[in-house]
């Protein structure tokens, strides 16, 4: 009889998504440590307590100078990555998401959402479109707008619901400072031909 194998449960960091043992190879070790300490304190002690650090240094074949150099390089990389993340966050917070109601013929309308760059790293435009389609029970697709950027077009007049959902998404992602702007695009009325002169 074959031996029954049990699945191994792997813990993944809530910040960098690596297993905690590998967080030092990511760009956000300080944040990872804070997360691990607040959620899994015993594992934090195992990995980052003073005794753990001393035993790590004792078992490594690097000299103390080499160890310090490596730590400086890691700290430098982490500072660079943190600055990059901060810059990206500021750029996202300065941008805006536009929810535009576009009238189509026969009193039909669609909602076009642009400014999707804000969601990079959170969700791809196609996944967002799928989410909108299922959430509002309607059709949704990704197209290119006049500027050549992705926008999501949702069938129906669901602008209020879309705006509320976007605010929720942004808040959950820590981007509640991003502005959501509503606009309306009405089709231009065709010019009436001039009336013939009276006879």
Image (cartoon, rainbow, N blue to C red):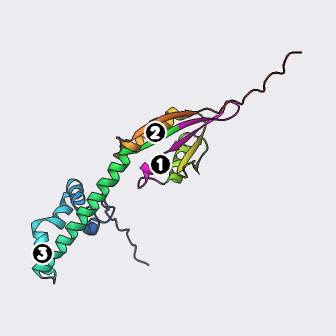
Mark 2: few/some/many CA within 10 Å (<14, 14-19, 20+):
some
Quadrant of residue 3 within the rendered picture: bottom left
Rendered location of residue 168, percent (x, y): 41, 40
Find disc 2 in the rendering and name its residue.
165
Quadrant of residue 65 within the rendered picture: bottom left
For this view, does 95 lie left or right of residue 77? right
Q: Quadrant of the C terminus?
A: top right
Quadrant of residue 157 within the rendered picture: top right
Rendered location of residue 126, percent (x, y): 54, 53
For this view, does 168 lie left or right of residue 131? left
Q: In what element is the residue under mark 2?
A: helix
Find disc 3 in the rendering and name its residue.
55
- Figure check: 192 above or below 40: above
- Between disc 2 and disc 3, the foreground one is 2
Q: Earlier in the sequence, mark 2 or mark 3?
A: 3
Is 109 magenta? The answer is yes
Q: CA distance from mark 2 to mark 3?
A: 50 Å
Q: In what element is the residue under mark 1?
A: helix
Q: Which residues are magenta?
A: 100-123
Q: CA distance from mark 2 to mark 1?
A: 14 Å
- Figure check: 156 above or below 48: above
Q: Are marks 2 and 1 in contact (CB under 8 Å)?
A: no
Q: CA distance from mark 3 to mark 1?
A: 47 Å
Foreground residue, 8 or 186? 186
Q: Earlier in the sequence, mark 3 or mark 1?
A: 3
Q: Quadrant of the N terminus?
A: bottom left
Is 192 magenta? The answer is no
Residue at image point 13% right, 74% down = 68
For this view, does 21 lie left or right of residue 188? left
Q: In what element is the residue under mark 3?
A: helix
Foreground residue, 194 or 15? 194
């Amino acid at each position: 009889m074959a031996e029954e194998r049990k699945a191994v449960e792997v813990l993944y960091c809530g910040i960098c998504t690596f297993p905690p043992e590998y967080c030092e190879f990511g760009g956000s070790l300080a944040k990872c440590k804070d997360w691990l300490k607040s959620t899994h304190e015993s594992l934090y002690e195992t990995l980052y307590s003073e005794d753990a650090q001393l035993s790590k240094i004792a078992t490594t074949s690097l000299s103390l100078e080499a160890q310090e150099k490596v730590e400086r390089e890691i700290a430098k990389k982490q500072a660079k990555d943190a600055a990059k993340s901060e810059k990206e966050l500021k750029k996202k917070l300065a941008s805006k998401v536009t929810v535009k109601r576009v009238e189509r013929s026969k009193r039909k309308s669609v909602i076009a959402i642009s400014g999707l760059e804000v969601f990079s790293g959170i969700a791809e435009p196609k996944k967002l479109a799928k989410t909108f389609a299922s959430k509002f029970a309607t059709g949704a697709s990704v197209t290119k707008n006049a500027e050549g950027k992705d926008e999501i077009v949702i069938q129906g007049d669901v602008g209020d619901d879309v705006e509320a959902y976007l605010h929720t998404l942004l808040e959950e992602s820590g981007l509640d400072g991003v502005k959501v702007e509503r606009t309306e695009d009405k089709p231009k009325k065709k010019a009436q031909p001039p009336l013939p002169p009276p006879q």
